Amino acid sequence: MVFEGLSGKLQEAVNKLRGKGRVSEKDVKEMMREIKLALLEADVNFKVVKDFIGKVSERSVGQDVLESLTPGQQIIKIVHEELIELLGRESSKVTFSPKSPTVFMMVGLQGSGKTTTSGKLASLLRKQNAKKPLLVACDVYRPAAIKQLEVVGGQLNIPVFNMGDKVNPVEIAKAAIEHARLKLYDLVIIDTAGRLHIDEELMNELVGIKKAVMPQEILLVIDAMTGQDAVNVSQSFDEKLGVDGIILTKLDGDTRGGAALSVKAVTGKPIKFAGMGEKLSDLEPFFPDRMASRILGMGDVLSLIEKAQDAFDEKKALELEKKMRTMQFTFEDFLDQMQQIKKMGPLTQILGMLPGVNTKALEGAGLDEKKMGRVEAIIKSMTRQERNDPAIINGSRRKRIAFGSGTTIQEVNKLLKEFEEMKKLMKAMGDMSKFGKKGKGRF
Ligand code: GDP
């Protein structure tokens, strides 16, 4: 992906804080310096970088973060949130006009991927919104541009309207819409001409087409691999023409990708779609939050942290840690933990947010909702005294618990045994971390 270099460096910077119990202002400063360098190297606009670092720094050195139980995680969450903000917070869709046909006008520099993307977009909206699209060839200057659009249309089985290269593009656009009305196409996508650089003549022509057909959306196609330049290009197009949304192409490339992180902040225009490859199916709606997660390489761990934050109470967590270390952890605490986890949502959904976790395999291993329900029923059938001191649970008590919870004596036995083993394990882990503290920091 285009962000690979940036992604690696950002991850390196944030990983230093992950799991750290104590983070100082100096740590935060060091991390911000690394993030800043990574962004500048990726060719993100300087002003955008400055703003981003300013916001993240300010939020990260707050007492609520540094003095929390998991400062490292909190800061990663802040970086993620600000990255989403940078990419546009909410995902934006294209809008269709109430009167058919809806007209979209594709603009951008030559080579940005305009022609290919016109086809990809027509195909995506045909599939997602049941549209009946018509592609229009208005690039009468570039040799073979019309032919290229026809090839793309042919592959997708989408008709292409063209009048050759001798007719004025404004006339072609008007005629195409007339044709669409007659033939009941409800979506017209106009592929316009691009140049290597922005020039007056081209802009005037695009303004002419815009006035003649009043498109519902003008979509600017930008090659994500171009850095600063992309920002200037977007600004010019927006000033002269007014742009409604941006489509970033070549996000599958392996260069720096600074454009992607700059255009929204500089132009204020939303990124609506992302081109992820050369195939005509490689166009996706753009989701800022998913992109931010991908850049930070975090699966959906962040939603998980958020959910955990909502569900868990920090004071309780500290008490619990102490109990685990000193072998005082009881069935009462266990039940409490289960209730808290349940508050976060279905178990498989929670675990599914971890990168690389295969929820099917987890279910296969017996780690599922049903099993959790049975365990809960068993604990609920114990008296308070039994929960706090499982040693008193003799044969007749086991029978009563099994009967009360609708399970079997074997299941009750198994849970009691597993619980004892878990307690031993917790104690061992507590001892190890104490030992680690005396030695070279925590393990
Ligand atoms: P135009 O001059 O703006 O119309 O650009 P084209 O549509 O001709 O695209 C230029 C080149 O970029 C072509 O070789 C496309 O296959 C390629 N391209 C377009 N979008 C993507 C993309 O998302 N990923 C990759 N890898 N290549 C793309």
Image (tube, rainbow, N blue to C red):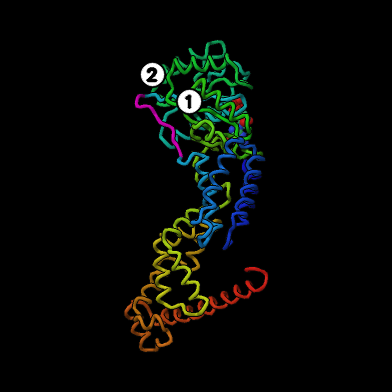
Say if residue 189 shows up in the picture.
no
Q: Quadrant of the N terminus?
A: top right
- Closer to us: 20 or 344: 20
**x%, y% of residue 243?**
49, 26
Does the magenta portion include 27? no
Indicate the amino acid at tag 2.
Answer: Leu
Dot 1 falls on a residue whose secondary structure is strand
Identify the residue at image location x=51%, y=22%: 239
**x%, y% of residue 41?**
67, 40
Circle number at residue 16: none
Instruction: Please give the residue where the numbered disc 2 appears in the rendered image.
Output: 182
Q: Residues within 10 Å of mark 2 (few under 14, many from 20)?
A: few
Say if residue 147 shows up in the picture.
yes
Identify the residue at image location x=51%, y=77%: 422
**x%, y% of residue 336?**
40, 70
Judged by depth in the image, the label closer to the viewer, 2 or 1, is 1
Q: Is residue 104 above or below residue 80?
A: above
Q: What segment carries the magenta color?
A: 91-99
Does the magenta portion include 93? yes
Indicate the amino acid at tag 1.
Answer: Ile
Say if disc 2 is inside 8 Å of ligand 1. Answer: no
**x%, y% of residue 298?**
55, 52
Q: Quadrant of the C terminus?
A: bottom right
Instruction: Please give the residue where the numbered disc 1 appears in the rendered image.
Output: 218
Which image quadrant shows ligand 1?
top right
Dot 2 falls on a residue whose secondary structure is helix
Q: Is residue 300 above or below residue 347?
A: above
Say if disc 1 is inside 8 Å of ligand 1. Answer: no
Identify the residue at image location x=39%, y=20%: 181
For marks 2 and 1 on the same chain, the one whose residue lies earlier in the sequence: 2
